[in-house]
Amino acid sequence: MQTDHSAAGGTTAPETKNTLIIACGALAHEITALQRQGSWTHIAVQCLPAELHNRPDKIPGAVQAKITAARERFDHIFVAYADCGTGGQLDAVLRSEGVERLPGDHCYGFFAGNEAFNAISDAELGTFYLTDFLARHFDRLIWQGMGLADHAELLPMMFGNYTRLLYLAQKPTDDLKRRAEAAAEQLGLRYEFLETGYGELETGLQSIAERPITWRNL
């Protein structure tokens, strides 16, 4: 995505992307939609595999490798991850690199709003969450990714303490709603639906997009 700008002497030069957002693949669709919506032509997005959520211990190292590879190409780097089960290890990496991330413990909080999400979670601790992405890829990431396709006997052990599935929807369609309801039935959970939009993911990234281009990571 490049834009030509008039320069002295009538020449033109392509706009460069001086900011990189390193994101979870589960947020790729929403972030690129926001990028188009906001015409953030100075921002590039690189995503890590969403499957890392099944191995959160690998997230800090994967993010650090992306940062190291991007240092020479970008003036500014920002991370679109929550803690995501890393137990503070992602924050330790980001402090050492001088890079910021979106606030929150879970990416679900980006959509519902962190304060609202904490209240939702406290109201019913045994809640399993889906987003648009997870509703779309439930079979690959959850049913197969967690081994349930081959070992359905693990279902009570993995989900026995859950009571409901809450679909936090960004841009819901009838197909996604059907998929989410089917996932709840497959897991034996009560189904609930809450449309959130892009929430704090949008406002958080908007604040990064609007920072002066002279800002640099420390």
Image (tube, rainbow, N blue to C red):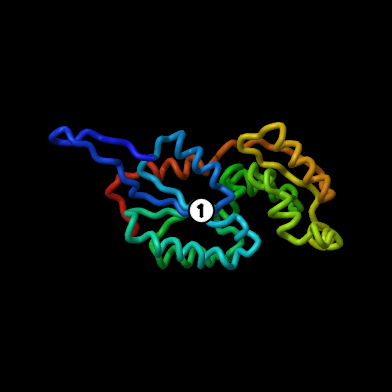
Q: Is residue 79 visible?
A: yes
Residue at left 79%, top 61%? 158
- Say if 168 sits above or below 74 in the image: above
Measured from the top left, where is residue 26 in percent x and y?
59, 50
Q: Which one is nearer the viewer's eye here, 102 or 16?
A: 16
Query: Outermost residue, front direction?
Result: 11
Please tell me which residue lies in front, 211 or 47: 47
Residue found at the far left of this picture? 9
Left/right placement of residue 96 relative to residue 156 reads left
Image coordinates for residue 31, horizontal then vertical, percent: 50, 43
- Residue positioned 61% across, 61% down in the render: 85
Quadrant in the picture for the N terminus: top left
Please state if 190 lies on the left or on the right of 39 as rendered. right
Q: Quadrant of residue 142?
A: bottom right
Up-down: is 78 above or below 56?
above
Q: How far from the left and from the top, in percent, is residue 178? A: 76, 37
Q: Is 163 left or right of 216, judged from the image as shown?
A: right
Q: Residues within 10 Å of mark 1 (few under 14, many from 20)?
A: some
Q: Residue at x 71, y 32 (%)?
A: 174
Q: Is residue 55 above or below residue 207?
A: below
Q: Which residue is mark 1?
A: 47
Q: Is residue 157 above or below residue 121?
A: below
Secondary structure under tag 1 reads strand
Kind of residue indicated by mark 1? Cys
